[in-house]
Amino acid sequence: MQNKILTVKYHDMVVGRLALTPDNLMAFEYDAGWLENGFSISPFKLPLEKRVFIANRNPFDGVFGVFNDSLPDSWGQLLVNRELQRRGIAPNSISVLDRLAIVGKNGPGALEFEPAAEMIAEYKDSELDDIAIQVRKIIEDNAITTEDKITEELFRIGGSSGGTRPKIFRKVDGMDWIIKFPARTDPIDIGAQEFNIMESAIKAGLDTPEHRLFNGKYFGVRRFDRKPNGDKVFMISAAGLLDADHTQPVVDYSDLLSLTAKLTRNMVEVEKMFRLMVFNIWINNTDDHTKNFAFLYDDGDWHVSPVFDLTRTPGIWEHTTSVNGKGIDITGADMLAVAHRVGISDKRAGDIMTDVKSVFE
């Protein structure tokens, strides 16, 4: 694998092309046809203009945020690296373009990359309990051999996934779902916990995806970046839009709500993000980093995505996304200050706060 140029596609249309500079910075140029008929895939970093864009070194090691979203996170990256090793390829010998080629057509959202590295083949629909055992083996055993079929199967069903918790993609009743498994530090009932939090989110008026608790213990959600007919929906995270390091507390909810206002130009969407902020504070979801907020582009409009990765995070005491500059000891006055900055009235903000609070009383 030594990809020099990758073609970026959306619904079989060419969006543009990717290459690397001699300094290993990503270069991107929109296709002429896309400039006429397409949309900006990253409105604040890649405006719809005829020029070659060069990524900054930080925060994504020379990768544009929108394409960093397509790369797997820690669990998926572990599986990719294990599969590369299984095939006799040193993980540090391949470029970011090669890694995007491995993602190919299997990444989140709607962007696809060609030529794709055909490393994902058909797989058997293993029982979830069997997959959980395989996941645990991968987590606990750092050894890898070329005969290791566990890694191969897990790679096929979860190698392009984001997030830190082990997960797989699966068809359920003809629909695309994501099903999660416990990580090393998770309590055994983490799936039930996340299910119950999502149920509380419904009561709090949040936009939630269809979700289930499989086998009474594995939390799953139907993918909102896939339509019932299988069409893909364009998706980008707040981290991707802002080129913001999601591993660091670099963003405030004021920034996030302002971003929502500028992108969607719709106060209904801004209020959705404010409601999510309030909910995260009430459930003590301190893992509220910029990759856990996403936006969808569909039918010419931007919208805040349904909520996801809603968890209580013991051991992390400060919110990753601050509230009025504070990570702890957040008050109602802090929440109102955030609302005020984006034009939400005190009354409307107070009503939303009361709605969310009532769920936990």
Image (spheres, rainbow, N blue to C red):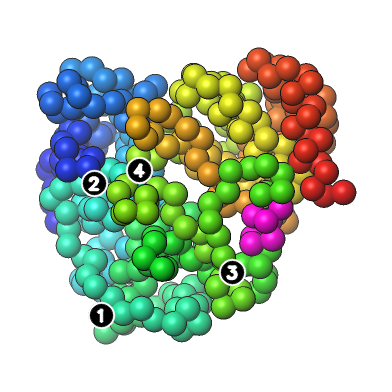
Indicate whether 151 appears above or below 4.
Answer: below
Instruction: Return the mark for residue 213.
Output: 3
* Placement of the N terminus among the 4 image quadrants: bottom left
Evaluate if marks 2 and 3 touch, with contact meaning CB atoms under 8 Å apart: no
Whether residue 261 is visible to the viewer of this picture, yes or no, is yes
With 48 as the anchor, is 32 left or right in this view?
left
Kindly report which numbered mark, 4 or 2, lies closer to the viewer in this rendering: 4
Q: CA separation, marks 1 and 3? A: 34 Å
Q: Earlier in the sequence, mark 1 or mark 4?
A: 1
The reply to whether discs 1 and 4 touch (Cβ–Cβ < 8 Å) is no
Q: What is the magenta segment's predominant secondary structure?
A: helix
Magenta segment, which residues?
194-200
Q: Amino acid at mark 4?
A: Val
Instruction: Check disc 1 and report its element: helix, strand or loop.
Output: loop
Name the residue beneath numbered marker 2. 112
* Residue type (three-letter) at the residue carrying disc 3: Leu
- As for residue 228 lying within the magenta part, the answer is no
Which numbered circle lies on residue 233? 4
Q: Label 2: how many residues lie within 10 Å, few (<14), some (14-19) or many (20+)?
A: many
Residue 235: x and y in percent read 39, 40
Badge 1 is on which residue? 146
What mark, if any, has residue 298 been given in the picture?
none
Q: CA distance from mark 4 to mark 2?
A: 12 Å
Q: Nearer the viewer, residue 266 or 4?
A: 266
Element type where label 4 sits in the image: loop
Residue 118 in the image: above or below residue 348? below
The residue type indicated by label 2 comes to Glu
Distance CA(mark 1)–CA(mark 2)? 29 Å
